[in-house]
């Protein structure tokens, strides 16, 4: 019988993960999976995303990164809808991260998501025909989703220049792990929280 704690991602990296942010622990699935692919079994369940492995959620966002502003093709036309193609990109990214940091790349990815997760954002409240911005707390599920989106947006944005997607994504994850303001994800997080603090 195989102990679940002995399972490794693709037989290579152990799931040695400790979250420091207690609010995210119940909403980020870091259980051991050999190949993290649930086949949509949690798709129609309320809060089903909390049961999806964090690596699968990351790959899913790589397939559908969305776009910022009106320039749709600048973000989305690079994306492939093939799960295993994006999985192979992530494996190459993990190899680069492991070589550069000498640490477990899954641990680096989870910490990068934790660092890039914003705590506040703005919503619009309508009163008497006028709209006012109001600062609101972000739910843990949305915090994780926004962090993943920002990391992948930053990687796709930088991969249009001289870098390919693998090197751009590995750089973005490492910068977010270090909480560096050179990271696009950290910049977006700070911008959201700054706008929210000015709208209290």
Image: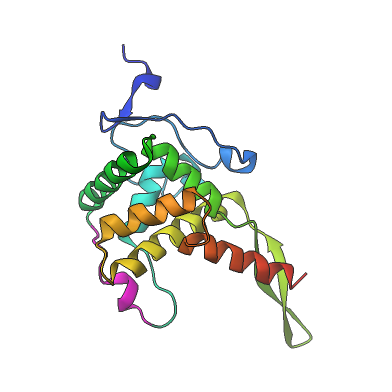
Please state the horizontal and vertical placement of residue 35, each as a whole percent of the image. 28, 36
Side of 95 where 112 appears, left or right = right
Name the residue located 78 percent from the left edge and 69 percent from the top edge.
200
The single residue placed furthest to the top in the displayed view is: 1
Is residue 25 located in the magenta-colored stretch of the structure? Answer: no
Please state the horizontal and vertical placement of residue 88, each as a whole percent of the image. 22, 47
Q: Quadrant of residue 153?
A: bottom left
Which part of the image, by quadrant, shows the N terminus?
top left
Region rendered in magenta = 71-81
**Chief secondary structure of the magenta span?**
loop
Asked which colour scheme the image uses, the reply is rainbow
Side of 156 where 125 appears, left or right = right
Is residue 74 located in the magenta-colored stretch of the structure? Answer: yes
Residue 86 seen in this snapshot:
yes
Q: Is residue 95 above or below residue 119?
A: above
The single residue placed furthest to the bottom in the displayed view is: 129
Side of 138 where 95 appears, left or right = left
Q: Is residue 116 above or below residue 67?
A: above
């Amino acid at each position: 019988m195989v102990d679940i704690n002995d399972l490794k991602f693709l037989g290579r990296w152990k799931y040695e993960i400790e979250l420091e942010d207690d609010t995210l622990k119940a909403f980020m699935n870091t259980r051991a999976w050999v190949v993290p692919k649930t086949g949509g079994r949690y798709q129609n369940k309320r809060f089903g995303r909390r049961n999806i492995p964090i690596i699968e959620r990351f790959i899913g966002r790589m397939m559908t990164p969305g776009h910022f502003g009106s320039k749709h093709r600048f973000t989305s036309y690079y994306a492939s809808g093939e799960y295993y193609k994006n999985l192979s990109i992530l494996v190459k990214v993990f190899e680069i991260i492991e070589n550069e940091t000498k640490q477990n790349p899954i641990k680096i990815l989870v910490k990068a998501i934790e660092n890039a997760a914003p705590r506040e954002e703005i919503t619009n409240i309508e009163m008497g025909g006028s709209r006012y911005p109001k600062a609101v707390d972000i739910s843990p599920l949305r915090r994780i989703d926004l962090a993943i989106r920002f990391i992948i947006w930053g990687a796709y944005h930088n991969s249009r220049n001289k870098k390919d997607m693998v090197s751009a994504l590995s750089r973005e994850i490492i910068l977010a792990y270090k909480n560096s303001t050179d990271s696009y994800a950290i910049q977006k997080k700070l911008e959201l929280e700054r706008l929210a603090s000015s709208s209290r």
